[in-house]
Amino acid sequence: MSATQERRSLLGRRTVVVAVGAAGAAAVLTACGGSDDPGGSDAVEQPGSGGEGKGGEVLAAASDIPEGGGVVFAAQKVVITQPRPGEFKAFSSTCTHQGCAVKDVSAGTITCPCHNSTFDAATGSPTGGPATQPLPAREITVEGDAIRLA
């Protein structure tokens, strides 16, 4: 094989190796990344009005948040719970373990589907799984039946 043919062959192999490596890296990053897509989950996005009146965006009516449960608002990255009748709490919906979005709130527990971390719906404290840090609290206001981000 001539020197010119050898260089072309080497360049062709390098191109293939670089392309395969880039595709593999993209696949890994996609698989490890979180998603704002609520599809296939219990996440609910309310088409609330933005910022009218006092406070921030209206997320939901208080009557939409089940007692002992809650609702995940994927677009706003917040989960609102009602641990006891008339008591509303809000937390970041980003799991403190590896940044996945929590997807379910029931029986007083917020659950992350990625590694099954669980959090107390009243405090955001971890109750199981690999997460060791609580979900950060988010500020909300309840005005009449409207729950708003503060």
Image: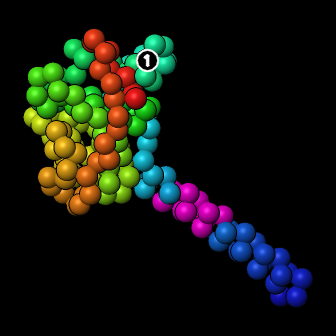
Confirm whether residue 42 shows in the render: no
Q: Which residue shows up at 83% across the image and 82% down it?
A: 7
Q: Nearer the viewer, residue 97 or 7?
A: 97
Q: Is residue 46 magenta?
A: no
Q: Nearer the viewer, residue 87 or 116?
A: 87
**Which residue is the site of mark 1?**
54
In the figure, residue 98 lies in which quadrant?
Answer: bottom left
Local SS, label 1: loop
Q: Is residue 24 magenta?
A: yes
Q: Is residue 5 above or below residue 47?
A: below
Q: Which residues are magenta?
A: 19-28
**Outermost residue, front direction?**
54
Q: How did the renderer colour the structure?
A: rainbow
Q: Is residue 121 left or right of residue 139?
A: left
Residue 11 image point, x, y percent: 78, 75
Q: Which residue shows up at 72% across the image and 69% down it?
A: 15
Please identify the dominant SS of the magenta region: helix
In the figure, residue 148 lies in which quadrant?
Answer: top left
Q: Is residue 55 above or below residue 79?
A: above
In which quadrant will I find the N terminus? bottom right
Residue 20 image point, x, y percent: 61, 65
Residue 86 image point, x, y percent: 15, 21
Residue 72 image point, x, y percent: 31, 32
Three-letter code, disc 1: Lys
Q: Nearer the viewer, residue 42 or 72?
A: 72
Q: Nearer the viewer, residue 9 or 113?
A: 113
Q: Is residue 31 above or below residue 8?
A: above
Q: Is residue 7 above or below residue 66?
A: below
Q: Which residue shows up at 10% across the image and 28% down it?
A: 84
Confirm whether residue 92 shows in the render: yes
Q: Which residue shows up at 71% across the image and 74% down it?
A: 13
For mark 1, does the 10 Å Cα neighbourhood hold few (<14), some (14 to 19), or many (20 or more) residues? few
